[in-house]
């Protein structure tokens, strides 16, 4: 009684009844079907098939009557070609389904990579924009060149003014030497104007 109750438990799967079918590896069968479909899709298969059918026709037409194994209507050949077609179609469909699965996985991987590349590109774009904004407050090469050129011009102008001032002082000293003045005077003194003549 206890064994019967244990066998009727609903929380455990029931043992399968009937004939057990042989199990096979779907991956190995798929690879095998792809190999067959790939072989049937080549020019070699068509050439070999044509040669076999031509030999079949030739033998069963030209050979002596007692050696012909498939007389004129070629019923056996028709049966073989029908069997080949009936098995070839599912094998080709299976190979196409496996290829479609691979293509779908590859497409998902490509989409994932494209999404990552887009995110990376957007991140780099934001970083470059931030650098450009930050560079707006930093002295650039062109700005430094323009400032250095302006400073060089100012130094040249100051050197020219200094040379003119020294030339004037020398001219004044030469004129004063003729007047016999004890104190050297320059254009900064209030007694002389810029041209060296006394102010009236």
Image: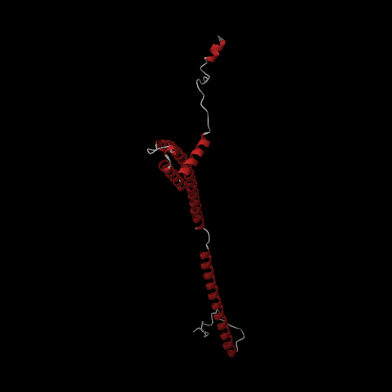
Q: Is residue 168 left or right of residue 107?
A: right
**Front-most of 134 and 198?**
134
Q: Position of residue 132 (x, y in %)?
A: 49, 56
Specify the farthest residue to the right.
182
Question: Looking at the picture, does residue 149 appear above or below residue 92?
Answer: below
The answer to which of 119 and 127 lies nearer the viewer is: 119
The residue at the far bottom in this view is: 178
Please say if 129 is above or below 88: below
Residue sticking out furthest to the top? 1
Q: The N terminus appears in which quarter of the rendering?
A: top right
Question: Which residue is pictured at 46% across the width and 45% down the height?
Answer: 48
Q: Which residue is found at the position 54% from the left and 68% from the top?
A: 148
Q: Residue 195 or 104: which is nearer the viewer?
A: 104
All told, the count of numbered labels is 0
Image coords of residue 63 (percent x, y): 43, 42
Does 170 sit above or below residue 121?
A: below
Relative to 146, is 189 above or below? below
Residue 32, horizontal then vertical, whole percent: 51, 38
Residue 64: image quadrant is: top left
- The residue lying toward the viewer, choosing from 32 and 134, is 32
Q: Residue 172 at x, y = what percent? A: 56, 85
Task: Identify the coloring.
Answer: secondary structure
Residue at position x 51%, y 36% in the image: 29
């Amino acid at each position: 009684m206890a064994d019967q109750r244990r066998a009727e438990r609903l929380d455990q799967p029931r043992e399968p009844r009937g004939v057990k079918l042989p199990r096979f590896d779907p991956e190995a069968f798929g690879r095998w079907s792809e190999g067959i479909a790939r072989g049937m899709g080549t020019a070699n298969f068509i050439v070999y098939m044509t040669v076999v059918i031509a030999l079949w026709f030739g033998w069963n037409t030209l050979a002596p009557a007692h050696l012909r194994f498939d007389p004129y209507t070629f019923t056996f050949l028709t049966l073989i070609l029908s069997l080949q077609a009936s098995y070839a179609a599912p094998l080709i469909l299976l190979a196409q389904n496996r290829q479609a699965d691979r293509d779908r996985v590859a497409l998902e991987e490509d989409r994932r990579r494209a999404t990552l590349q887009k995110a990376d590109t957007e991140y780099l774009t934001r970083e470059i924009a931030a650098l450009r904004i930050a560079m707006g407050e930093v002295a650039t090469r062109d700005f430094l060149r323009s400032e250095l050129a302006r400073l060089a011009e100012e130094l040249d102008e100051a050197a020219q003014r200094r040379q003119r001032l020294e030339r004037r002082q020398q001219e004044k000293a030469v004129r004063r030497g003729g007047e016999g003045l004890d104190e050297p005077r320059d254009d900064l003194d209030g007694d002389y104007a810029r041209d060296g003549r006394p102010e009236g």
